[in-house]
Image: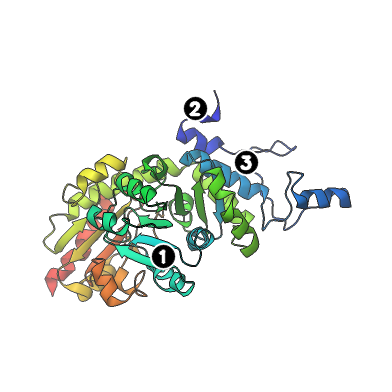
């Protein structure tokens, strides 16, 4: 047996394990900023690259390296870089690959901060950007009918759970000369494999499902050795978005239960979606594995489960959404997601409040929308809490 033949659940426990001479059972935590050298000559050789060793924790750290190797093995990627936050990973990915005069095509339905980076920051550097309806292959075809350097997308999207046909878009992008970067946070590492669908690089906020307990921040980019160890690594070493050894260690330990947690959360989300779909106060509901989703067949084709997020819209708009959120007793109000605890938020006034109203509405994010991150509580208790909160609307 080799690591290449191990099941992903085995890799989540054993992948990248590198014990010290003390032969500890759990992964070691290296909380040092620097490393020492037995001689000045070895230090010089190390910086010239003639010796493969750790130099400085901003460049690399043994604990962070274990995390990166494990994530890469689980993803089926050649290499990985872990960073301090998900947005550090996103920004590093686009900033290291794009130059003045380049063109990026992105799905319009993005997390608010990702949208702002592409819409506001990149154009300042002379980078052309074009947004498309990610669900429309016709718009992708038109946008990629001329050369582009990068395609950036989320699938499912935050918070509307719109799907992009990753395989079809990747084919169009590669013909246009573009690299394909997929934010797979909502798809989850256990539920969707963008690299197998043709993507060149996968991005995660490992703050979410990978940690899964609301404790630490982190991000990751995964792809080929050439891509991760090329311009991206140079950018990473010079700009310093490194993940701390402590945060890397926490996520390493969480990876051991990733599939157990996420599969249970996705099963709960499916039950919650089924219960809310026909509730009289719910105008419409989105969950990729619910038959009412407009891209249900695509979801079944490119995802192995429906994810952990359910979004639903209330007929009464913002007033009703806030009333329901305030009436929840079990589920917490929070803009985080992927946690063991179920969390709900009002995207229009939280995660996407920085997006101009016109652009937000173009994404489909109205004032009545609630995004629910389903956790590990018993599904019956979650459904009871949601239905009781929704029933308060009938008392008005």
- Disc 2, disc 3: CB below 8 Å? no
Please, what secondary structure does the residue beneath circle 2 have?
Answer: helix
Separation of marks 1 and 2 at Cα, in angstroms: 36 Å
In the shown orientation, is residue 280 left or right of residue 45?
Answer: left
Q: Which residue is mark 1?
A: 114
Q: Quadrant of residue 394?
A: bottom left
Judge the density around disc 2: few (<14), some (14-19), many (≥20) Cα neighbours within 10 Å: few
Q: Residue at x 55, y 26 (%)?
A: 2
Residue projecting furthest to the top = 1
Separation of marks 2 and 3 at Cα, in angstroms: 23 Å
Q: Is residue 198 above or below residue 158?
A: above
| Mark with earlier residue (2, 3) | 2
Separation of marks 1 and 3 at Cα, in angstroms: 35 Å
Q: Which residue is mark 2?
A: 5
Residue projecting furthest to the front = 146
Q: Quadrant of residue 365?
A: bottom left
The tag on residue 26 is: 3
């Amino acid at each position: 047996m080799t690591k290449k033949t191990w099941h992903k659940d085995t890799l989540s426990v054993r992948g990248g394990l590198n014990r010290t001479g003390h032969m500890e059972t759990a992964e070691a935590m290296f909380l040092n900023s620097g490393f020492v050298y037995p001689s000045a000559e070895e230090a010089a050789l190390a910086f010239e690259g003639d010796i493969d060793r750790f130099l400085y924790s901003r460049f690399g750290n043994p604990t962070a390296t274990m995390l990166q190797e494990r994530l890469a093995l689980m993803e089926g990627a050649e290499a990985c870089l872990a960073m301090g936050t998900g947005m550090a990973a996103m920004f590093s990915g686009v900033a290291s690959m794009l130059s003045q005069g380049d063109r990026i095509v992105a799905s319009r339905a993005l997390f608010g901060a990702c949208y702002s980076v592409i819409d506001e920051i990149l154009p300042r550097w002379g980078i052309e950007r074009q947004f498309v309806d990610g669900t429309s292959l016709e718009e992708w075809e038109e946008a990629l009918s001329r050369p582009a350097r990068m395609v950036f997308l989320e699938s499912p999207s935050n918070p509307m759970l719109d799907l992009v046909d990753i395989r079809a878009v990747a084919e169009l992008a590669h013909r246009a000369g573009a690299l394909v970067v997929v934010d797979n946070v909502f798809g989850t590492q256990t539920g969707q494999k963008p690299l197998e669908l043709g993507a060149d690089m996968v991005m995660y906020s490992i703050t979410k499902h990978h940690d899964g307990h609301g404790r630490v921040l982190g991000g990751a980019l995964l792809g080929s050795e050439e891509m991760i160890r090329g311009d991206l690594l140079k950018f990473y070493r010079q700009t310093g978005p490194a993940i701390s050894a402590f945060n890397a260690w926490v996520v390493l330990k969480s990876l051991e239960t990733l599939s157990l947690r996420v599969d249970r959360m996705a099963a709960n989300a499916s039950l919650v979606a089924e219960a809310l779909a026909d509730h009289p106060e719910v105008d419409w509901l989105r969950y990729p594995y619910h038959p009412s989703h407009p891209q249900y067949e695509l979801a079944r084709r490119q995802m192995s489960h429906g994810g952990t997020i359910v979004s639903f819209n209330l007929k009464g708009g913002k007033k009703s959404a806030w009333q329901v959120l305030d009436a929840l007793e079990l589920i917490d109000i929070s803009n985080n997601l992927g946690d063991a605890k179920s969390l709900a938020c009002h995207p229009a006034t939280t995660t996407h409040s920085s997006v101009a109203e016109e652009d937000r509405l173009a994404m489909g994010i109205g004032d009545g929308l609630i995004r629910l991150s389903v956790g590990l509580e018993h599904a019956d208790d979650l459904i009871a809490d949601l239905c009781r909160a929704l029933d308060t609307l009938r008392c008005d």
